[in-house]
Image: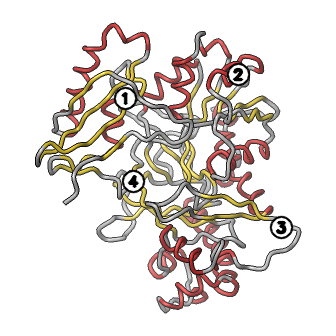
């Protein structure tokens, strides 16, 4: 229990009555809705078109049933019609509230979304991160290495801003190559690393010395889905505890964090907790648009409870996961959440030989096999048939047992998907940001 107390940022919210938390969320959201209806042409236009009067809403149930959702396609259309940033950011701002701008990497060739937040909103973002950082055991003043590049993308920038705001001594090494990153890590010996999950594995793989000797205590992973088994191997290599996170550019932040239990195990996976005082996460049945129950799969819709000047209200993410209800995690927190290793794109399901294949299930199947460092899948057409070719990158300690690993991966995939995959050992390109594990070159008819 003493260890649990050390990992609590705000016991008044983390262990509050769930209905009291919903009341807090509604009180924050009410002001945002009223302000947006008066000052934000983008949301006002959508609500007027749907004949929704947000002033008449009485509670979160009313909000969720009446207010239409928005998505990245609508943001892009708004930017095209009202360049450069769209009418959703046209509110006249206080000159003492400079904007932080963020872009996305692009959406299906249509261009990059532009998002922003004010100085005050940025401060609220830092307050939200304090929960996740505290759960991971970070200590203010200690050194942290940020391995993500700092660019106009939200990823990298918000992590840096949050860590500095929390009080970490941040080493921004993301724009260095792997060799220089490792040199810097050995020079400064940070207590934590902040970045993408697969890149931590890459650093360990290319290092000419054991990385656990660096003395890192905490790995703040994220940006891609891996199972507890993969995370547990990463923990062993680094001699550190791994904690996961999830966010999106539209929110301009991570908003789901694992608690002190981390990834858990394959048989008992951890939970990514929503920081409910700062974000409303709805997990809805794709068929009915109704909230799912604990343990059921649903699609995520996100509303920020602190972005007032640059609001985000009922944004459909096209990401889904297994919902975990308040107090369902072993930590006992009242925050809702998503089960680790279940988040994936709802529009990213691959149909192979007529069977729906979920990339997160493939991740779990492949990374459950010891020795797999990374993988890539190439989908091709052979006549009228689909061919799925898996290329594995192994860690050095398993190269001598390569054929055994190949066989085990092939059988794991067949058991998980019911399909036969061509599996071999080869070169797999690395990424310092989000890894791209699938390439689809099949004929389109």
Which residue is most to the right?
A: 96
Disc with the residue nearer the chain's start (4 vs 3):
3
* Residue 190 screen position, x and y as percent: 73, 24
The total number of labels drawn is 4
The residue sitting at 16% across, 38% down in the picture is 419
- Which sits earlier in the primary sequence, circle 2 or circle 1? 2
Give the numbered dot on residue 97.
Answer: 3
Quarter of the figure that contains the N terminus: top right
Question: Which disc, if any, is residue 345?
Answer: 4
Q: Nearer the viewer, mark 2 or mark 1?
A: 2
Q: Residue at x 46, y 32 (%)?
A: 264
Q: Which structural element holds mark 3?
A: loop
- The disc placed on residue 433 is none
Name the element at disc 1: helix
Gap in angstroms between the C-alphas marked 4 and 1: 19 Å
Q: Is residue 383 left or right of residue 307?
A: left
Q: Nearer the viewer, residue 294 or 281?
A: 281
Q: Are marks 4 and 3 in contact (CB under 8 Å)?
A: no
Badge 4 or badge 2: first in the primary sequence: 2
12 vs 136: above or below: below
Is 190 on the left or on the right of 199, as rendered? right
Q: CA distance from mark 2 to mark 1?
A: 26 Å
Q: Can you identify the residue that label 1 sits on?
A: 367
Residue drawn at the location 71% of the way across and 61% of the way down: 101
Kindly identify which residue carries mark 2.
185
For label 1, the crowd category at 10 Å Cα-Cα, with few meaning under 14, some 14 to 19 and many 20 or more, is many
């Amino acid at each position: 229990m003493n260890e649990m107390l050390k990992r609590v940022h705000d016991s008044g919210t983390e262990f509050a009555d769930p209905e009291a938390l919903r009341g807090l969320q509604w009180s924050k959201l009410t002001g945002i809705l009223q302000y947006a209806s008066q000052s934000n042409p983008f949301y006002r236009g959508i609500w007027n078109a749907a004949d929704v009067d947000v002033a008449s809403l009485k509670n979160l149930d009313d909000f969720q049933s009446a207010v239409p959702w928005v998505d990245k396609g609508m943001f892009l259309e708004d930017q095209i019609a009202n360049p450069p940033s769209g009418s959703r950011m046209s509110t006249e701002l206080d000159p003492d509230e400079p904007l932080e701008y963020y872009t996305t990497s692009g959406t299906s060739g249509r261009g990059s979304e532009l998002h922003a937040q004010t100085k005050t909103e940025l401060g609220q973002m830092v307050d939200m991160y304090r929960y996740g950082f505290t759960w991971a055991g970070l200590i203010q003043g200690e050194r942290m290495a940020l391995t993500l590049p700092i660019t106009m993308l939200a990823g990298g920038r918000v992590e840096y801003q949050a860590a500095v705001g929390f009080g970490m001594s941040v080493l921004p090494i993301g724009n260095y190559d792997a060799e220089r990153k490792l040199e810097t890590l050995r020079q400064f010996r940070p207590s934590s690393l902040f970045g993408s999950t697969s890149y931590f594995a890459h650093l360990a793989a290319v290092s000419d010395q054991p990385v656990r000797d660096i003395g890192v205590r905490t790995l703040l992973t994220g940006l891609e889905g891996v199972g507890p088994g993969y995370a547990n191997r990463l923990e062993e290599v680094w001699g550190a505890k791994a904690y996961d996170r999830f966010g999106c550019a539209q929110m301009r932040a991570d908003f789901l964090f694992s608690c002190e239990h981390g990834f858990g195990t394959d048989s008992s996976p951890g939970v990514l907790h929503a920081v409910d005082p700062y974000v409303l996460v709805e997990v809805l049945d794709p068929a009915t648009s109704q909230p799912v129950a604990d343990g059921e799969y649903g699609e995520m819709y996100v509303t920020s409870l602190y972005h007032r000047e640059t609001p985000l209200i009922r944004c459909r993410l096209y990401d889904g996961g297994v919902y975990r209800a308040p107090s369902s995690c072993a930590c006992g927190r009242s925050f809702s959440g998503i089960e680790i290793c279940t988040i994936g794109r709802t529009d990213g399901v691959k149909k192979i030989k007529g069977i729906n294949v979920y990339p997160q299930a493939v991740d779990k199947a492949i990374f459950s096999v010891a020795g797999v460092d990374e993988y890539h899948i190439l989908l091709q057409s052979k006549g009228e048939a689909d061919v799925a070719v898996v290329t594995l990158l192994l860690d050095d300690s398993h190269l001598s047992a390569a054929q055994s690993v190949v066989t085990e991966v092939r059988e794991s995939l067949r058991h998980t998907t019911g399909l036969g995959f061509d599996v071999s050992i080869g070169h797999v390109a690395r990424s310092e940001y989000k890894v791209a594990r699938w390439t689809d070159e099949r004929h389109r008819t």
